[in-house]
């Protein structure tokens, strides 16, 4: 059995938050508005003017003492915020705490358009309407339960046998879902460029559609990354990775269990292989791990929240100990 990683109590030298990125957009020709905030507070105002958009909220935690590790940046998926990494729906320790206890400086983000990063007017600035996740769709597509298996009462849910997701806390989980736009990937990546330029080469741990965007950014600006961990990236470009640009960047891609339980996941996993093949074929420092092949079973799309999330965090941390640029 592998030696247990040395964990510390959390002791912080500094913590706080800031916004990074963003730009002005000036809108003209919009109609005036009247807003009734309350029975005795009515405001008439012009909508024309300057709007700040494309900014990203970042919360940081710097451990005390020597911390020889590069900054670790958490990049959530679509319709999600940094809360995914803070804790689990049933109240257990999240990956943010885990990596802080190992001594990593952690930067947790709400991507552009999410949570405390804020929205912008649409369709004037965001070029499409937001989309929203239903409880039924999330229960199935995130591989928590069977088709038509959602029920607000946990006793009536139809979960996937052997799932590690804490399905009894699913109602708590869906409170984390926020609106998402399908048109803002460029703004999101621009904000992460600003953050990584500020921090210097960093370890980026990105999830789902966030992992897709992080991989695209790593191909464009590999010098911003010290290592890249992709948790179940959900989409890929039409062309294979540029092996020459990516050859020095350590990349770990992780997929969980039950990919055959939902029609979209086998194709996603296949396209991951095709897209990454150029750097998997001995020309780079990349590896794809399917957790069941390691004997780690039962994991959903949200493995950072699964009941065995600390086991998976150990896998990531051990890989990072050896993930060095040449």
Image (tube, helix red, strand yellow):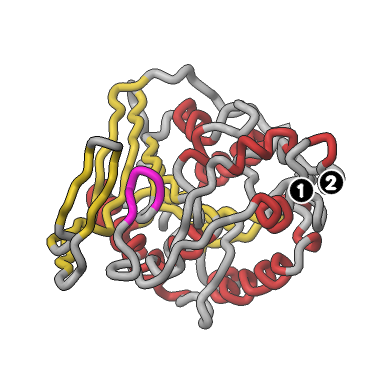
Q: Is residue 245 left or right of residue 57?
A: right
Is-magenta flag for residue 115? yes
Tell me: 179 left or right of 217.
Answer: right
Name the residue at the front extreme.
39
Q: Identify which residue is drawn at 58% across, 57% down.
A: 253
Indicate the secondary structure of the residue bearing disc 2.
loop
The residue segment tinted magenta is 114-119
Badge number at residue 112: none
257, above or below 61, in the image: below
Q: Nearer the viewer, residue 178 or 80?
A: 178
The residue sitting at 65% across, 69% down in the picture is 268
In the rendering, at what x and y percent does residue 191 appear? Answer: 29, 57
Residue 204 screen position, x and y as percent: 43, 51
* Residue in front for this viewpoint, 255 or 278: 255
Q: Where is residue 248 in the image (x, y as percent from the top left)?
A: 42, 63
Q: Residue 158 carries which label?
A: 2
Q: Which residue lies furthest to the right in this view?
A: 161
């Amino acid at each position: 059995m592998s030696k247990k990683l040395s964990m510390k109590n959390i002791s912080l030298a500094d913590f706080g938050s800031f916004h990074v990125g963003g730009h002005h957009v000036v809108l003209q020709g919009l109609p005036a508005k009247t807003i009734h905030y309350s029975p005795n507070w009515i405001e008439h105002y012009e909508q024309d003017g300057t709007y700040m958009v494309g900014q990203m909220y970042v919360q940081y935690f710097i451990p005390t003492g020597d911390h020889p590790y590069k900054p670790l940046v958490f990049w959530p998926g679509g319709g999600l915020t940094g809360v995914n990494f803070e804790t689990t729906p049933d109240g257990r320790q999240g990956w943010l705490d885990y990596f802080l206890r190992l001594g990593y400086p952690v930067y947790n983000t709400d991507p552009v358009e999410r949570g405390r990063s804020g929205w912008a007017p649409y369709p004037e600035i965001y070029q499409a309407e937001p989309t929203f996740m239903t409880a039924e769709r999330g229960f199935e597509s995130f591989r928590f339960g069977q088709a038509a298996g959602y029920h607000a009462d946990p006793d009536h849910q139809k979960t996937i046998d052997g799932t590690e997701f804490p399905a009894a806390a699913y109602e708590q989980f869906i409170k984390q879902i926020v609106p998402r736009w399908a048109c803002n990937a460029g703004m999101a990546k621009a904000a992460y460029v600003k953050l990584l330029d500020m921090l210097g080469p960093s370890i980026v741990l990105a999830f789902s559609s966030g992992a897709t965007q992080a991989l695209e950014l790593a191909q464009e600006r590999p010098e911003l990354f010290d290592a890249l961990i992709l948790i179940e990236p959900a989409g890929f470009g039409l062309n294979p990775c540029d092996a020459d640009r990516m050859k020095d960047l350590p990349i770990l891609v992780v997929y969980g269990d039950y990919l055959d339980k939902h029609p979209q996941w086998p194709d996603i996993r296949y396209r991951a292989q095709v897209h990454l093949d150029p750097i998997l074929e001995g020309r780079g420092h990349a590896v794809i791990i399917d957790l069941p092949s390691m004997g780690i079973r039962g994991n959903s799309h949200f493995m950072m929240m699964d009941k065995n999330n600390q086991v998976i965090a150990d896998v990531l941390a051990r890989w990072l100990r050896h993930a060095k640029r040449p």
